[in-house]
Amino acid sequence: MSMLEVLKQSSNPEICKPMAKAVIERAKHFHETFGRRPVLMEVCGSHTMALARTGIKPLLKDHVQLISGPGCPVCVTDQRSIDSMIALAEGDNRIICTFGDMMRVPGSNKSLLDCKIAGKDIRVLYSPIEAVSIAEANPEKDVIFLGIGFETTIPILALMVGEAEKRGINNFSIWMATKLLEPVLRYLLDAGDVQLDGFILPGHVSIVLGEDSYSFLVKDYHISGVITGFETAELLSGIYKLIGLALSEMPRIQNDHPAVVTKKGNQMTQRWIGRYLSKCDEAWRGIGVIKGSGLDLRQEYDKYNAKIRFGVETIEPRKTKCRCGEVIRGVIAPNECPLFGKACHPMNPIGPCMVSAEGSCAAYYQYMRESY
Amino acid sequence: MEKLISLAHGDGGELSHRLIRDIFVEAFDDKMAALFDAAAITMSSRQVAVTTDSFVIKPLFFPGGSIGKLAVAGTVNDLAVSGSRPAFLTCGFVIEEGFPIGKLKRIVEDMAAEAKKTGVQIIAGDTKVVERGSADGVYINTTGIGVYETGIGCSLNFEEGDAIIVTGSIGDHGIAVFSSREELGISSPIYSDCASLNRMLWDVLEQTKGIRIMRDPTRGGLATTLVEIAEDFHVTMKIKELEIPVKREVHGVCDLLGFDPLYLANEGKAIIICSDNDKQMVLDILRTYPEGKQAAIIGSIIGKDKGQLLLETPLGSTRGLSRLTGSMFPRIC
C-alpha cells in the first residue's frame, strides 16, 4: 500500500467509526473505575487543530476531556518578544523574513502585517533557508529571520546559520525566540494547575527528539504519553492506547508512530543544534521565564544573532483581558475567556491563540464554536 | 534583444497604434471594431447580464493557464453562473513599463484562444502603460455581456432536500498558483482548473428545470461561497467532507502548509443547487464534459431558517463553517 493510500485509509469512516466507538467504551470503563472522565493533554498545536478539524474533540467530549497544551509556537511567544520583533521590523533598510503564522499576531500597537501594509519589507517564507539567499541577493540590507518554533523548527535555524557561514554572508541574522518541550511540560506538571492522565505527544517533534526524550514523564511524574501522528485513525489509536495506559496505572511512553520515530531521534539534527545553539532562559506567554527552556545562538555566532546586532526599544506590553496564558496552560478552555468570539475573533485577534494556524482559540472558533 | 514595453506604447502615437494592430487586433481578429472608438453590437430586446472583473494574478503564467486565459474564463463564468449566455467581452490592459512584448503577445493569444473556445467575441479594448514600479507586470480588466433567454435560468426557489453539486475537484487553482511560485520548490505540477464553463452550464440550464442557483467558488473557495448563499437566502446546508472531491496532490500540499481546500480558490468550478428530482440528470449532463467529469453531489439543503453552512466530518460529527477570514498564511510546522 502506498503512503497516499495509507493516508486515505486513515480517515476512512469504516475504520475510524469503530475506533471512535472503542475509545468511548474504554473511556466509559475509565469512568467506572475512577469516577471521572480521563483527562488528556495534546501538547502540540497541530494536534489541537487536527482534533478539532476531524471532529474527534466534539465527538468524544462527553467521555474524554481533551485539553490543549502549550505547543503552538506563536501562542507561547511572550508579548514583549512579539513587540520586539515588530519594533525590529520598523527599522530602516531591513528585510524581515518570517513564517506566515506571525504576520497577523497582534503586538501591543500593531502587527507585522500592519508594518507590511505601511511599506516595510516583510516577507513570508515557505522555506526558511531562503532567507539566506535573500541576504545574499540584497547585500546592502540587513536580512533578519524571526526564529520562533519548537524542536521541529530549531534544526532549520541551525542549518540556516551553517549556510550563512558557508556562503560567507554577513548581513543575515536570526531573532531567536525558540522554545523547548521538556522544560514547559515539567513546569506544567510541577505547577499542578491541571490534573492529567496522560499526554498525546507529537509525531513530528518526536522524529527530532526520539522516544527516549519523554522518559522524564514516567520517571519523575509517573504519567504516560503516546507518540502519535495527525490523521484521524492515528489520533484515535493514540487516545485509545493512552486511556489504556492510564487504566493500567503502569505509566510508560508508547511509540504509536514507530515507522518514523526512533528511540534516540534524529542524531544528525541534534548535532547541528549542539554545534550552533545552546540553552537559554526563555519567557513564555502567561507563564513567565522558564530556566533553560529555549535555545540561543552560541557566543561564537554572535554576528548572526539579531538580538546582539540590533537593539530594540519596547514599551510595557499593553494589558488586555485576553486569557491566552491560561488557555496555553490548559487551565481554561478557549470559550471560557470573556473575550472569546466577542471582542476577540479571527478578524480582530486580541491574543495570538486566535490568529495562529495552530492556536487553541482559532481551532475552537473555527471548528467547535457551535455544537449541532 | 528582447522587445520591451515603453511608456511611448501608451501615449496614443505610432507605437500605441502598432502595439494594438500587431498584438490585439491580430489575435482578436476583429479589424472592424478596432477602427472606431466604440464597438457596435446588435442585441435582441432580451434582458442582458453585465459583469466586470479585474485580474491581478501573480505569477502571470501558471500550470494550466495564464492571466489571459483567466481574464476570459473568469468573466465568462460569472455570466454563465448568472444563467445568461455569454456573448461579448471588453478588455482593459494596464501594462508596466519594461514588460516584455513577447510575453504580452502570449497573454493576448491565450485570451483569444479561450474566447474562441467559449464562443464569445472580444469587441473593445484599451491599453495603458504605467511607469516601471507602478504596476506588477500586467493587470487586465474584462467586462462581459451575456444574454438571458426566456424560461431559462435559476429560480432561487430553494426547498428542503435540494441537492448541492460541485462540478469537480476543489482547490486546484489555489494550489497551482501557490506552488508555481519558485520558492516553494514543489516538483510535481498541480494544474489550475482555469476553464470557461459556459457551454456545460448552459446545457444544464436548458435541459433541466429545477436549478435554484449557480455560483463559481473563486476567491474564498467553496466554503465562503456556500456561506454567502446560506446567509443571503436563509437556507441551512449540510455538506459531507467525504463527498467533496479534492485531488490527492492538493490534499498533500494543504497538509504540508496548513491550508484548508474548502477555502482555496477555483477558476473552473461551479456550485449548482438543484431540486432533488433533477440532481441525477444534472450530474449526468456535467459528466459528459471534461470540466465536469468529477462532478459530485456534496450535500443538501436541510432547512430554510437559520442560514448556516454545516460540514459533516468522516467521523459523523458536524461542525459549522464560516467565511474565510483574512489571507491564508502557511504555518510553521
Image: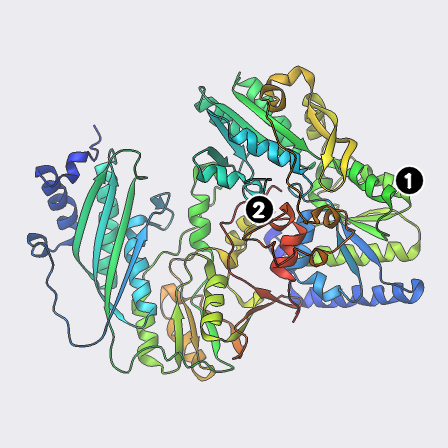
- Rounded to the nearest angstrom, the CA distance separating label 2 from label 1 is 35 Å
Position in image of residue A270 (x %, y %)? 72, 29
Q: Quadrant of the C terminus of chain A?
A: bottom right
Amino acid carrying label 2: it is Leu
Amino acid carrying label 1: it is Asp
| Residue A235 seen anywhere in this rendered image of the structure | yes
Q: Quadrant of the N terminus of chain A?
A: bottom right
A237 up-or-down from B299: above or below: above
Q: Is residue B46 left or right of residue A353?
A: left
Position in image of residue A102 (x %, y %)? 57, 40
Which corner quadrant of the image does residue A191 belong to? top right
Position in image of residue A190 (x %, y %)? 87, 41
Q: Are marks 2 and 1 in contact (CB under 8 Å)?
A: no
Q: Is residue B241 left or right of residue B91?
A: right
Q: Nearer the viewer, residue A350 or A360?
A: A350
Q: Nearer the viewer, residue B320 or B222?
A: B320
B313 up-or-down from A260: above or below: below
B71 up-or-down from B208: above or below: above
Residue assigned mark 2: B256
Residue assigned mark 1: A220
Q: Secondary structure at mark 2?
A: helix
Position in image of residue B110 (x %, y %)? 26, 50
Q: Secondary structure at mark 1?
A: helix
Q: Is residue A256 left or right of residue B194?
A: right
